[in-house]
Image (cartoon, rainbow, N blue to C red):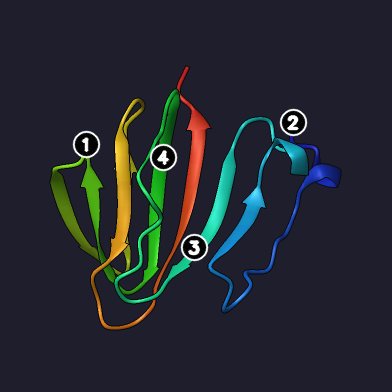
Amino acid sequence: MTNFSESKIVKLVSGSKYQRLFSKDSGTCGIKAGHVMLKTGEDVGEHSTNDMEEALVILKGTGQLIINKKDGLDFEDNTVLYVAPQTIHNVKNTGDGTLEYIFITSNAK
């Protein structure tokens, strides 16, 4: 049964490069989520999912998901990407405008 007294609503902040949406610190059981906005040419920086799996919900713009320093997947708005556990990856804005997306991670074990 859902405990609605613990449900949360978070408003997305426009103009902020990074906004934490949910984490254990905000009361989730394990989901982490954030809102990311990248300018043309910007990237989030190479990082690993470790034991987490990750979904990227692309809201606006075009970009490239670079996997394991070599494989690049081009994407555009209104798409959802999946990144498996133990994957080194980076997200880069390859478009002319802002790239905006939500990332959601969850423990894969």
Residue shown at the point (22%, 41%) measured from the top left: 67
Disc 1 to disc 2, how far (Cα)? Answer: 40 Å
Residue 35 visible, this angle: yes
First in sequence, mark 2 or 4: give its number.
2
Q: Nearer the viewer, mark 4 or mark 1?
A: 1
Which numbered tag is attached to residue 36? 3
Disc 3 to disc 2, how far (Cα)? Answer: 32 Å
First in sequence, mark 1 or 2: give its number.
2
Residue 27 visible, this angle: no
Residue 40 relative to residue 25: left or right = left
Disc 2 to disc 4, how far (Cα)? Answer: 26 Å
Residue 34 in the image, given as x and y percentages of width and height: 56, 54
Residue type marked 3: Val
Label 2 with label 4: CB-CB less than 8 Å: no
Which numbered tag is attached to residue 54? 4
Residue 51 in the image, given as x and y percentages of width and height: 44, 23
Quick check: 97 above or below 24?
Answer: below
Q: Which residue is mark 2?
A: 1
Q: Residue 25 or 108: which is nearer the viewer?
A: 25
Label 3: few (<14), some or many (≥20) within 10 Å? many
